[in-house]
Amino acid sequence: MNGMLESSDDSRIWQAAAAALAALPAKPARTEAQQAEAARHLLAARAAREAFLAKHAVPLYCALTNDLSRFLRVDDLVHEAAARVPGLVPTRAQVEAEGVFRQADKDGCEIDQGLLLSHILADPVCGRHLCHAMLLPRPEAAALLPRLQRDGRVELSSATISRLGNATLVTTRNPRFLNAEDEATLDDFEIAVDLATLDPETSAAVLRGDVVSHPRYAGQHVFNAGINLTHLYHGRISFLWYLRRDLGAVNKLIRGLAVPEAPPDEWRGNTREKPWIAAVESFAIGGGCQLLLACDYVLAERGAYMTLPARKEGIIPGAANLRLPRFTGDRIARQAITYGRRLECEAPDGRMICDEIAAREEMDAALLRVIDGLTDSGAVSFVGNRRALRVGAEPLDTFRAYMAVYAREQAFCHFSPQLIANLERYWRAQERAA
């Protein structure tokens, strides 16, 4: 790989562009002419990267993974690629240096991570291998499993794993932001999903939002407010957050946990899986609604609602574009994603996603009833049916191809001026403290 670059001008082009950018003032202080100059350098360097990746993304991935014998998660993969091919993607230090700025004040060096990951995911062999890597249980979960078995409970900073009847309950929390998701919650969420799936004492898993203290919802459970828009506006959500979330924690809800020694193919039956039940209380906004599409049964509180406000945020709502149409049909899905259609959980369109409605005071009892109903015939048949349904609905190659598009398009959305304009217009994010 290094020899290949010795006969190429690509690396010199990328590094020259980086040096030219570094010689300019920081983005907020640039003149209009300097901003145009920066844009020219970025475009030229990305065109060279695209040409390089079209030829060399697969050999690079094979070199980094020792011919697919080594698993790398997306964050480790891009950082090792930065060391192996200088200038192809930003180094960890470069990402951290730009990370101190508000989102509007970044040049978007992380876009190049999206280009690399898009090319890798587009290749059927390398893309499946990367998906496999992201479906492996986290080492932190394996270390915490004995505590869960001993105490029946594990407390993480933003999630609690406990038992509820014959299910392992994952309760997520981010109370200041109505249980929204951000960099501080993602690792805990994925570890919690792993623990609930690995727990040998239960046959199902439940996802629920914790009680919040917000004046409007004080004392109430809130399922999930989606991505933390305040943190997004202030530049505190990395691009890799999206890929880590949807290739990792969310994909584990729908596909279970893989094992290192065999690919996560449905016909092999070698994934570790449980049925997932979602308890929707108050609302499931954005990423919260996305989670429902990856669960097997949705119990919703009467009066709760769902939205996918991607248009007002300026980003792609995870894998909802892939999954929502099979629940609601294409037309309602397009209205929800591109026109902000709100789905009331107990209305006819909401019932296409929600299986059961219960009054707020009945949610605890209803959850226990649903758990019993899903597990009284044993977990083996339910997991077998999960796999059989998944083959027709969303086989791994379909998901992989979707994520190849998502990695590229979300990278450009994440650094788009329209995103900032939308957050200021609809969220008034400039007035909110991070």
Image: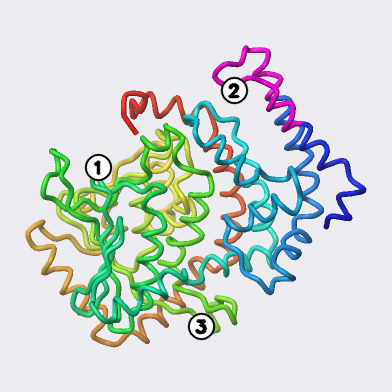
Q: Residues within 10 Å of mark 1 (few under 14, many from 20)?
A: few
In the image, residue 241 lies at what x, y percent?
48, 49
Q: Earlier in the sequence, mark 2 or mark 3?
A: 2
Q: Nearer the viewer, residue 213 or 335?
A: 213
Checking the image for residue 26, the label placed there is 2
In the image, residue 9 lies at what x, y percent?
87, 41
Residue 372 sits inside the magenta stretch = no
In the image, residue 8 lies at what x, y percent?
89, 45
Q: Quadrant of the N terminus?
A: bottom right
Left or right of 192 in this view: 33 = right
Furthest residue in direction right, as rendered: 7
Residue type of the residue flagged with mark 2: Ala
Q: Residue at x 37, y 59 (%)?
A: 188
Tell me the distance, in whole angstroms, between the alpha carbons under discs 2 and 3.
51 Å
Q: Nearer the viewer, residue 376 or 428?
A: 428
Residue type of the residue flagged with mark 1: Arg
Q: Nearer the viewer, residue 251 or 334?
A: 251
Q: Residue at x 36, y 38 (%)?
A: 340
Residue placed under numbered mark 3 in the picture: 270
Q: Quadrant of the C terminus?
A: top left
Residue placed under numbered mark 1 in the picture: 176
Q: Main secondary structure of the magenta part?
A: helix
Helix, strand or loop at disc 2? loop
Part of the protein shown in magenta? 17-38
